[in-house]
Amino acid sequence: MIEKSNKRAVIVGLFVLVGLSFLVAGILMVGNLHDTFQPKIKIVSLFPDVSGLKKGSNIWFSGVKVGVVSGLKFYGSSQVAVDLNIENKVQQYIRQDAKVKLSTDGLIGNKILIIYGGTGAYPEVVAGDTLEVEKTFTNEDMINMLQANNENLLEITTNFKTMSTKLAAGEGTIGKLLNDNELYDNLSATTHALHKTVDATASSLNKASAQAQQLLASLNTFSAGLNKKGTLAHDLVSDTLVFNSVKSTARQLQQIADTARVMVATLQTASRNPKSALGVLLYDESTGANMKATLKNLESSSLKLDEDLEAVQHNFLLRRYFKKKAKAQE
Amino acid sequence: MKDNQEPSAVFSNSLDAYFIGVFRGFHFFLRFFKSVFTRPFHTREIIHQGYEIGLKSLSLISLTGFVIGIVFTKQSRPSLEDFGAVSWLPSLMGIAIIKALGPLVTAIICAGKVGSSIGAELGSMQVTEQIDAMEVSAVNPYKYLVVTRVIATTLSVPILSMYCSFVGLTGAYFNVHASENTGLRVFIQNAFSGISFLDIYTSIAKTVVYGFTIGMVGAFKGYHATQGTRGVGKAANEAVVLAMFLIFLEEILIVQVSNWFRNF
Amino acid sequence: MNKSQQAPIIDSEATVIRIEGLRKSFGTLDVLKGVDLTVLKGENVAVLGKSGSGKSVLIKIMVALLQPDAGTVIILDQNVHDLRGKALDALRLRVGFSFQSSALYDSMSIYQNLAFPLSINKPKMTRKEVDFTVEETLDAVGLKSKMLQMPADLSGGQRKRIGIARTLILKPEIMLYDEPTAGLDPVTCAEINALINQVQEQYKTSSVIITHDLTCAKSTCNRVAMLIEGTFLKIGTFDAVFQTEDAQIHDFYEYNFIQ
Ligand SMILES: Nc1ncnc2c1ncn2[C@@H]1O[C@H](COP(=O)(O)OP(=O)(O)OP(=O)(O)O)[C@@H](O)[C@H]1O
Ligand SMILES: [Mg+2]
C-alpha cells in the first residue's frame, strides 16, 4: 500500500515538474503578448546599408512605436531588403509616398527605423508596398560635405573679390552707379539720413531698455508692496505712488512703440522713391538681383559652414578633439 | 508483501525521491491556499513573526542597501562620463535600485537570514516531535507554524524592499551630491523620472512573490526535515539554496510578464 | 505495590479503545504484524517491549500521527483513521499524548507551553481562567515554581512532568504515555508513577502506558501486554503475564530486574 501511494507521488511529482517547466518555457518564449496578437501588415524597404539594424528593432512613426523589423535579407548586389511589420491600426496614417530612414533611439540607443512624411495625395499603404528610403548622413558624409562647402566658399569669395575690384574701377552698372558723383552725393546723403535714423533707433532702443528697467524696478516695488500686507484692492487704492509710476511707465512704453512706427514709415517712403540712391539700388532689378544673389550665396554658404562646424563640434566622437584643441589654445 | 521485498522504484531510487519531493512541495503549496482563509487566523503570531523577520534583517539591509547605492553610483559614473551624461546618473540609479537592486538584494538577504532561520526552527521542531505534539493537542501545526510565517514573510519582504530601495537611493544621493553637487530635489525628480507606476507595481509584486517564496521554501524544508539534528542543518541550508534559485527564476519570469503589460 | 488486583474504577462494560489486526511496515521492515488490544474505561494498560519493537509506532498510529497499512483503531467509538479535520481534532482533544521526548515547545516558557493548547482550542476562555487552569495543572504535577522558566532550563524528569501536564490541561478522557520513566533515576520514576496513578484517579482517565520498565508497569497498570515480534504475545495481569515459561518474556523479566 505504501509503495502504491509512493508510486502515485512519483508520477504526480513528475507531472508537476513537467507542467512547471512548460509554464516557465512558455512565459519566456511568448516574447510579447500584445505584439503577438496585434494584426499586422508587412511592407518592405530597400536600404543600401542598415548600420546594424536588427530583427526586432522598433519602427517609429511621428515618434510613436508602430511596429518592428521582422526580417532582413540581402537583395541584389549590395542592398538589404528590410521587412517592416506595421500594426494595422496605423495603416491609414501612413501614405504611399512616406519615406523611411534609419535613426537611433536617443544618443546612443538602439537602431530604429523612422517612417515620416507622406501626403494625403497618395493612398494609404497596403501590405507588400515598398516605401522609399532616404539617405541619412553618417559622420563621414558630414566631413565630406564640409570639404565641399569650403571649396565653394573659396570660389565665392574669389568671385566677390574680382567683382568688387571691378566695381571700384567703375565697370558695370553698379560700378558706374557708384562712381557717378552726383548720385554718390545723393546716396551718401541718404545713407547719412539712414545713419541718423539708425542712431535714433538705437538711442530710442537704449532708452526703451532703460525705461523697461525702470518699469521692472517699479513693478518690483509694486509687487513688494502687494506682498507686504492687506488686500490687493486696498493696496492699489492707497498706494497712489506706485500706481502712478506704473501708469507713467506704460505711457513711456507707448511712446517707444510710436517712435518705432514713424521710423518704419520713413524708411518705407524713402525706399518707394526711385530717385533716391537706395531706391535705385532696390528698383534696378537686374543689378539688384545679381548683387542679392551673390550676397545670398555668401550668406547661405557661410551659414552652412557655421552649421557644419557646429554639428561637428557636437558630434561626441569628435568632441574630445575639439576639447583638446580648446585647451591647447588657452 | 513478503514476496515483494525489494521496493520497486518507478525510475531509480534517488530520482523517485526527487519527484516525491516535488510532489510534497506541490502539496505543501496547495495546502497553504486551503488553510489561509479558514479560522483560526493566529493574527498575533503573524504580527510576532513579521516583527521578528523585520528585526532580523533590518541592520543588514540598511548596511547593504546603503553600500550598494554608493558603490553602484560610483561605478556607473565613468561610463556615463564618456558620453557627457553624468546628469543621467540619478535617473539611472533610480531605475537600477527601484526596479532591480532593492527587491533582489532584500530577497537575497531575507533568503539567507529569514529563510534559513525558518528552515532551522521548523526543522528542529520537526525532529524533536514538537510539530507532532501540536497536532495531537488539536492545534493545526501547518496553520500555526507555516501559514503565519509565510504570511509574515509575504508582507515584510515588500516593506523591507521599499526600505532597502530608500536606503540605496540615499546612498546614491550622497555620492551624487558629493561629486556633482546635485540638490536633493533635483536628485529626487531625476531619480523618479525613469520610473513609471507599472515599474513600482512590478517591484512590489516581485517582492510579494519573493517573500512568499522565502517563507514557503523555508517552512517546507523545515517541515519535512528528517535525520535528527543533521536534518536541521540540511533543512536550513537547502531552504536558502532553493529559495535563491526560485527567486532568480521568478525575477526573470516577472520581468517578462511585466513587459507584456508595458505595451498595453 | 502491585496494582493488578485493585481496580475500583474500571467499568468492564465500556470499551474506550479497540485495536484490531493492526499492521505497519516501513519499506521492507515489518514493525507491527497484526496487533489486537482493547482498553476498558478507567483502566491502565501497559505495553511492554524491547527497544525498537514498535511500541512508539503503535501509539502514534492510535492518534493518527502515522497511518496503518491494515487494521482498525476505534477510540471512543470512532474509527481514528476515517476522521479528518475538525472531527479528528475533536477526538484528539479527548485523547492526551505524552511524548517519549517530552516535545516541549522550546521557544515558549513553561506557562506558554501549557497555555498554548488552551488558548487555541478554547478561545472563549478569559485570560484569568487560563492562568488559573495553568497554575492548577502545574500544581498537580508539582512544578508550579517553574512556571516562568524555559524548557531548556529543566531536567529530564521535570520536562516529562511538564509534558504530562500539557496534555492534562485539556482534560482528556484517555491518556497515552510514551515511556514516561525512560532514562530517569528510580526516585523520579516513582514520582512519575505516582503522578500517573494520581491522574487516573483525579481525572478518571483510561491510559495506555508504553514502557520497558517493569516497576512502572507493575505499579501503575491494571493489565500489561507484551509486544514481541510485532504482535502481543500475552495480555493479562502483571503476574499472569510473567508467570510463563515463554523464553522471550522470561528474558525480558529477568533482565529488567537484574538491572
Ligand atoms: N518514521 C519511520 N520510518 C522508518 N522506520 C521507522 C519510523 N519510525 C519507526 N521506525 C522503525 O520502526 C521500529 C520501531 O520503532 P519504535 O520507535 O516504535 O520503537 P520503540 O519500541 O518505541 O523503541 P524504544 O523503546 O527505543 O522507544 C524501529 O526499528 C524503527 O527503526
Ligand atoms: Mg519509543
Image (tube, grey):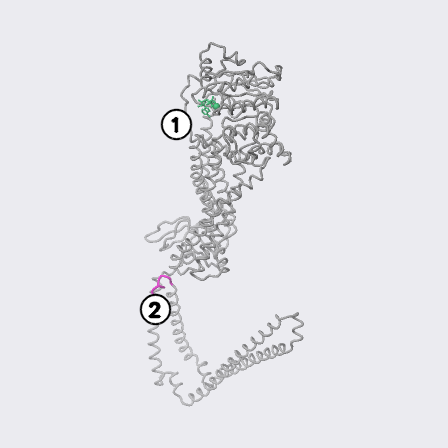
Chain of the residue that carries numbered disc 1 in the rendered image: B
- The answer to whether residue C224 of the structure is visible from this angle is yes
Whether the magenta-drawn stretch holds residue C27 is answered as no
Nearer to us in this view, C100 or C257 = C257
Residue at the location (48% across, 10% down)? C244
Q: Are marks 2 and 1 in contact (CB under 8 Å)?
A: no
In the picture shown, does residue A77 fall above or below B121? below
Identify the amino acid type marked 2: Lys
Q: Position of residue A34 (x, y in %)?
A: 49, 46
Tag 2 residue: A327
Identify the amino acid type marked 1: Ser
In the picture shown, does residue A273 fall above or below C114? below
Q: Position of residue C185 (x, y in %)?
A: 48, 24
Nearer to us in this view, A248 or A268 = A248
Given the current orientation, which residue lies at the most extreme front position?
C187
Tag 1 residue: B12
In the picture shown, does residue B156 fall above or below A202? above
Q: How many neighbours does mark 1 have within 10 angstroms: few (below 14), some (14-19), or many (20 or more)?
A: few
Secondary structure of the residue carrying tag 2 is helix
Residue A177 left/right relative to C153:
left
Find the distance from the CA under tag 2 to the CA under tag 1. 75 Å
Give the quadrant of residue C82: top right
Residue A215 left/right relative to C32:
right
Chain of the residue that carries numbered disc 2 in the rendered image: A
Whether the magenta-drawn stretch holds residue A326 is answered as yes
- The answer to whether residue A36 of the structure is visible from this angle is no
The magenta segment is: A315-330
